[in-house]
Amino acid sequence: MPMIETGEILQTMRMIQEENFDIRTITLGINLLDCADHDPLVCAERVYDKICRTAQHLVSTGEALELELGIPIVNKRISVTPVSLICQGDPRPIAQALDRAAKETGVNFIGGYSALMQKGATLADERLLASIPEVLSTTERLCSSVNVASTRAGINMNAVREMGEIIKETAQRTADQDGLGCAKLVVFANAVEDNPFMAGAFCGIGEPESVINVGVSGPGVVKKALESCKGAPFDTVAETIKRTAFKITRVGQLVAREASQRLGIPFGIVDLSLAPTPARGDSVAHILSEMGLEMAGAPGTTAALALLNDAVKKGGVMASNHVGGLSGAFIPVSEDIGMIEAATAGALHLEKLEAMTCVCSVGLDMIAIPGDTSAATISGIIADEAAIGMVNNKTTAVRVIPAVGKKAGDTVEFGGLLGFAPVIPVNSFKCDEFIARGGRIPAPLHSLRN
Amino acid sequence: MTKALISVTGLDTTGIIARVATKLADMNINILDITQTILDGYFTMMMVVDLDGAHMGFADIDKELQTVRDELKMSIHMQRMDIFDAMHRI
């Protein structure tokens, strides 16, 4: 192999030191199906033991790789089998066991307090849903997700209605922390089984006994690369993003392979998502601005995001032997300084965000809405987002935070990677009767596509 | 072969290379390549080394290098070459 040139070494160092390039997460997926028991306490004990045993070297391995490769690996996390599949009684002891296991193994989040109910609910799903507000207000590191729709099954509107109420109640129970519980709760359409990112990570039933999935980041690197092609046509923009995404993903692949080897756990996928943080220079919205928009939300935003999302995938897919998860650009509001600025300035509205979710990964993410928004309205937002996912055969999600006692223009503060956000207004016309209907919206036809 | 890059940057002074090279020799680490320049009094050196013969593991080598860093008041980083190979070579 030809010797690496000085310029190439400096470029890598600059990406890491100045442009916030990092590995966002190594997520260890663990199958918990063998922990099922009719006694929730026995099940909880097995869950705790299995996670602690399987993940005992996860954090130390991540830290060793960080040191040796000289790149930050920001999060080490665990995803588990959706808890509703292993729980035959009260799921709350299992929630506490998961939280304790997260603390014992040193991971900052554990995902999988989840139910898959796109077509209907089992008794276990119902029990899990009912427990979510209490669980998210009494645990620290546990994340919850619920799949309410899929392209094949349609939208379970009963689940959509329930989730509106659950989000409201979770916000109430964690009101003293600005509704932090809702930041750990995501409602999906077409949820994926190998997503390494929180709050929506869980270990799907098609996954192996345990698996290593890696999420890369690097919006700052992409923005910096685009600074070198100011005014150039979009062909050049797309090409530049592809080249950058390739380089970023190669490092993700290296970390995934090394982590997999050292832990003796098979490598699953690299998730190509561009994940922002609230730090300056780590923003997806600023990439859109670099393309020539005054702010994210300006006309042209959806087109810019579509180009970005596609180019990231095209560049990344060549760099890894297995790509999966959500793989696309994330557009969380509170976790992206450019999005925060755009929402504060009034450039970015909920409706524009919804349009953006049609062309990028995931959906309405980390958006603070007024505390007096009704449960039915939140369900309406979920239904719209689920419809986009269902019809377009893609993953969509809703993670909104009703800011208790606050109104549009106020600010909520979560701290750390979760950031802060202005409360943005929600359309005040009602959808109560629509949501009250319940039932299922049938799966869409996938021929005659016009 | 486990290759690593050691980058040394900071204000130029006498004996930087000697100090770093001596420390590496003490640990039985072979130097494969050195590039060094001075820009506006700012010393920049990149060394490619072979860690296979070293008496200790990566973390301990890194700690030893930190003592040199403190002594010379320069920035010294070591990282495996794999990250550069992954990013820039197919």
Image: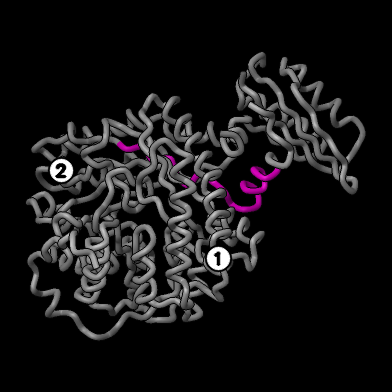
Q: Is residue A170 above or below residue B37?
A: below
**Residue A292 or residue A76, whichever sits in front:** A292
Amino acid residing under circle 2 = Leu
Quadrant including the N terminus of chain A: top right
Can residue A127 be seen here? The reply is yes
Q: In the structure shown, which secondary structural element does the residue marked by tag 2 occupy? A: helix
Can residue A49 be seen here? The reply is no
Q: Residue furthest bottom?
A: A429
Residue A23, magenta (yes or no): yes
Badge 2 density bin: few <14, some 14–19, many ≥20, Cα 10 Å: some
Residue A209, magenta (yes or no): no
Residue A275 x %, y % = 46, 54
**Residue A446 position by quadrant:** bottom left
Question: Which residue is tagged 1?
Answer: A286
Which residue is pictured at 27% across the width and 78% down the height?
A373
Q: CA distance from mark 1 to mark 2?
A: 41 Å
Question: Which residue is tagged 2?
Answer: A85
Residue A279 x %, y % = 56, 60
A426 to the left or right of A121: right
Q: Which residues are magenta?
A: A10-29
**Chain to which the residue tagged by mark 1 belongs:** A
Q: Is residue A304 above or below residue A17?
A: below
**Residue A70 or residue A40, whichever sits in front:** A70
